[in-house]
Amino acid sequence: MKRIVDNKHPLAIRWFHWVNFPVLAIMIWSGLLIYWAYHPYKIQIGGFTLITFFPEWFFNGLHLKRRLAEGMSWHFALMWLFTLNGILYVGYTLFSGEWRHLFPRRNSFREAWQVVLHDLGIRKGPLPMEKYNAAQRIAYSSIIVMGFGSLVTGLAIYKPTQLAWLTTLLGGYETARLLHFALTIGYVLFFVIHIAQVVKAGWNNFRSMVTGFDVVDEQA
């Protein structure tokens, strides 16, 4: 027997989620257009380069070259929407009490390993029945911290003269830019894992984030 559970995800949470997804995706894309103009970052061991962010074929394949002005226009316009959406989201979770479901608890970091082992198929036992498991609590809270970090580092490299105190506090322009880039890589990794988890969870979980209700099976 199936039962509909109403209001699994409140309308405000769904709204903030679906606004943030395309805004952040476009900001990553526009950030790549900006990064093309000067792309020095790579992971290196001694004289051997493991990863270059990003090789020339990457920019050519995605047609990212020579679009610096376009990238800056999109990035600087959408950063205000990204910031406003983030502020409203945090404010809503605090005043509505949703933070109780989202923020990590004292034992969340220990429980998160059990979630990872379960997702990898190593742990067979069922997970605790709750709105968000320990790994999700940590991930979703981390995204809030990352969003704040992106705002702060972005302002530091956007207005390094007017906000010289902030740029200096972050270790200078080059350090602030590196932190901003590292946070962007973090978003991409989060996207990949998040989408994989949505696919693994199935249609019912995706539908609940669109409609707000969930359909659960009950024992007769």
Image: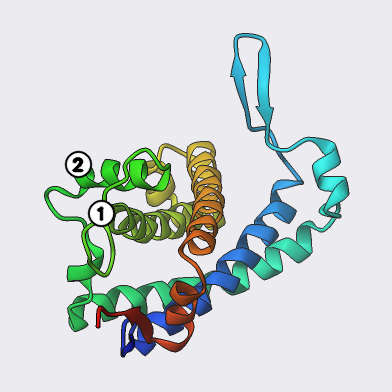
Q: Tag 2, which secondary structure? A: helix
Q: Quadrant of the C terminus?
A: bottom left
> What amino acid is at disc 2?
Arg
Q: Which residue lies furthest to the left in this view?
A: 106
Image quadrant of residue 103?
bottom left
The residue at which mark 2 appears reads as: 110
How crowded pointer 1 is (Cα within 10 Å; few <14, some 14-19, many 20+) is rated as many
Tell me if residue 162 can be seen: no
Disc with the residue nearer the chain's start (1 vs 2): 2
Q: Which residue is drawn at 17% across and 78% down?
A: 97
The part of the image, by quadrant, that contains residue 29 is bottom right
Q: What residue type is labelled 1?
A: Ala
Name the secondary structure under disc 1: helix
- 18 or 206: nearer the viewer: 206
Q: Residues within 10 Å of mark 2 (few under 14, many from 20)?
A: few
Q: Name the residue under label 1.
A: 134
Q: Nearer the viewer, residue 160 or 135?
A: 135
What residue appears at the point 88 percent right and 47 percent down from the top-left corner? 60
Q: Nearer the viewer, residue 145 or 117?
A: 117
Residue 109's x, y, as percent? 22, 44
Q: Where is residue 71 in the image (x, y as percent from the top left)?
A: 72, 62
Question: What residue lies at 54% left-to-right and 50% top-to-bottom?
Answer: 184
Residue 45 spot, x, y in % from top left? 59, 14
